[in-house]
Amino acid sequence: MKKFARAVCFCLIAVLLLALLNRILMPDTDFSADLKGGVADEPDYIMLGTSNVFYNVNPLVIWDETGYTGYNVSSEQAPLIISYYELKNELKKRKPKTVFLDCGAFEYNYGIPSFNQLSLDKMPLNMDKLRLISELGEDDENNQIKAKNEYSKINYLIPLYKFHERWKDILDGTLKSRYHDKYEHTFMGYVAEKSVFVYEKQYKWLPTLKEFGGTYLTEVSDLGREYLSKIRTLCEENGIELVLFKTPSKGWIREMHEAVTELAKEEGLSFLDMNSEAVLEELQIDENKDFADSSSHFNIYGAEKVSRYLAAYMKQNCSFTDKRGHKDPLETAWDQMYQEYLDYKEN
Amino acid sequence: MSLVSLYFLLFLAVVTLVYYLLPGKVQWVWLLLAGLAFYALCSYGLLIVPVLDAVIVYFFGKYFETKKQKLLMLIELILLFGILILLKYAGRIGAGWSGFLKGFGFGQIAAYAVPIGLSYFTIMAVAYSVDVFRGTVQAEKNFARLLLFLTFFPVMTQGPILRYDEVSKQLVTPHRFSYQNLTFGVQRILWGFFKKLVISERLAVVSMTITEGWGSSAYSGIWVIASFFAFSFRLYMDFSGCIDIVIGTAEILGIRLPENFNHSYLSRTIPEFWRRWHITLGTWLKDYVMYSITMSRPAKQFAKKAGKKIGRKAAATIVTCIGILFVWLVYALWHDISAVFLVSGAFYAAIIILGTVFDPLIKKFRKRFASLVESIPYKVFMTVRTLILSTIGAFFVFMPTVKDGAAYLAAIFKAPTGAVMQMAKGNSSLLGATFLGLDLPDMIILVLAFVFWIVVSRLDAKKDPRVRLSEMNIAVRWIILLLLVLVVVLFGKYGGFDTGSFVYQAF
């Protein structure tokens, strides 16, 4: 019996050491909103989706415009299935009045495993995560569901399996910085990027797939439908309004714009597509100043335009209350965060 | 299911837990089920093959208990080897076996058309049958127990080749849980993981870098010999590491399997090498091929007749040489019907036959220069020589064609060229450079791990390192073991992290 206790003890130490190693070696990619001090205990909204959310929507600008509080819950190329579980996790902690779902993810099914790895690494290990790992599939080059997963799911379950070789990064000092660089300046789940990217070739807005040349889905897939319906049910169960939207993106194709418009109509959901001519007219995107990279992500200037528009939309369509004018700690905290953002912008 | 995988460890954990919870009398049934499940997980429907082999040897064995007919033995051998040849080689003939299976809608099976362990359980079945025929082993009356012998899961993938009389009793007798078996078994598995993942996978990069570079004549001269060492130790770490996992697994279940390696790289002659490398194959070839030839009636008659003309010793040498030729022919065919294996077999056969023919001369030499033979430089020379010769034989079989192998050997005699160190483009730091394909941190790990392996191997020659470990203070023991776990997890080459896949793209 004594020997058994010893063996168990040994195994526990080994597991703890490995867990520690896991923690040390996992790339730091978490840029989720810092909600310390109760700054968003009762958020007005959550912006859910892909990089089109975390690069394009700045909750602090929305605060400055409206006095509404909210934050982004998004990951690189998160497919709808991941967004669903991210929302589920978030709702265990806080319940917003409205969830805005960016529809970019309708253009593929499961997306790219290495991106999904980043999303999953941020999630706490619980039953939901296990369920997500078991359900998560993989796309082929046409974004259709692959018959067989090639990516070993053990990487999702035990990130150390994938990242153990990062011990080498200790040597050149990039262990913590390599994946952090991009997310150095984050504000409520918004990733601020100052660099300016100018397209050599002029891409039009809402191109057809043929014009754009990618390999996106042109119709809402069964999987897309299934997880939209799950997200919807989740919102309904929690008394949350669900709004579909799409931030401006040159990779958002006309076919999908039409398909999602149709889907929203069927489902009786609002769909705000900011790629429409009318919205773009109002946004006044400057092609020489507002983009951050070749993937149609906005820098701080473009993101401000998108966020102001969203603020105006909320004012008009949502029944949130302006939390300014009370001089309470919440207001002070948000003002301070906005000031921090302005400081970053100016310097 | 690879033995070097988390899935296998999980499988083993479940098997072990249930194994020791069950009453001793039915433990063997559980082992049989585990073997069948393991087989089904690896080769799907082809589980039928070992079952078929078991049926064949079961009925023939029962028959041989009462009557021994050589013709029937021959038929049985043809059946067993026929299945082996059909499954292993038919794929290459015409549209192939896979196409045949696919044609009947068995696409998934076709992908696994060669059942795992086919070569192993076939010759285990042959050994059992021959033993029954020779009367050295009693025929098994219980079919399920015979099936267990042929499908014992740890040995499925890479051996060792089991003998019925060595393990059958162990497989079916009840085993009570033993803490020592568990810890020793786990430690042996851990050691196997260390050899395979930390050393072998790195050596693989070095040997592959030189071998592939050879095509573009980037490496020649001394680097070819260096690649021999890298290749040779890689193969040793890989194979013996796997066997460590196998033997450790069986040990956890209370079953002692025969060793398959005995520091073969220390051998001073090729016959000695083959007594220390893949031991169970060597003894199998000796017992069932060599003896079958040299002890056969025609061989004895030949020796008697020829002995009168050329002398008894010379006649015996000729018989031995014929036996050796057959041994290496079977060695080659068992592995693969290909020119490179035939050349490899012929190479070993030639060396051993030369050794046999010149044995009297060699003995005289050793007697005359006894002090030289006993000197350390001579021993080192013999060891290195044997290492190189054994590697050439093994190396050959991994060459695409005989011509490639010959050209590679010829490159030894060219002026040495080789890019040992390659700097990364636009990066002057040593961290960006590669040494024979490995970056600096990996090279350091390889050297350190290799030194550690040498130390442990030296200790092993005198006393089992696990016994030494168990005699140590608990704190020291735990630190050593935990470090080994961390080293395997951290420095093992598995899974993999591809920085390239993080380049931010479409969204």
Image: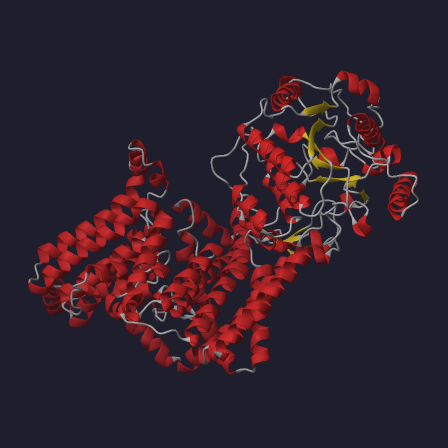
Q: Which is nearer the eye, B135 or A228?
A: A228
Locate residue B256: give its quadrant: bottom left
Q: Which is nearer the eye, A7 or A168?
A: A7
Residue shown at the point (52%, 64%) measured from the top left: B194
Residue shown at the point (57%, 29%) measured from the top left: A225
Give x and y (percent) for residue B199: 53, 61
Q: Which is nearer the eye, A109 or A34?
A: A34
In this rendering, would B228 be left or right of A325?
left
Q: With respect to residue B493, does A298 lie above or below?
A: above
Q: Which is nearer the eye, B259 or A311?
A: A311
Q: With respect to residue A139, does A163 lie above or below?
A: below
In this rendering, would B28 be left or right of B132?
right
Give x and y (percent) for residue A52: 72, 33
Residue shown at the point (43%, 80%) measured from the top left: B374
On the question of residue B269 being in view, the answer is no
Give x and y (percent) for residue A135: 53, 41
In this rendering, would A295 be left or right of A234?
right
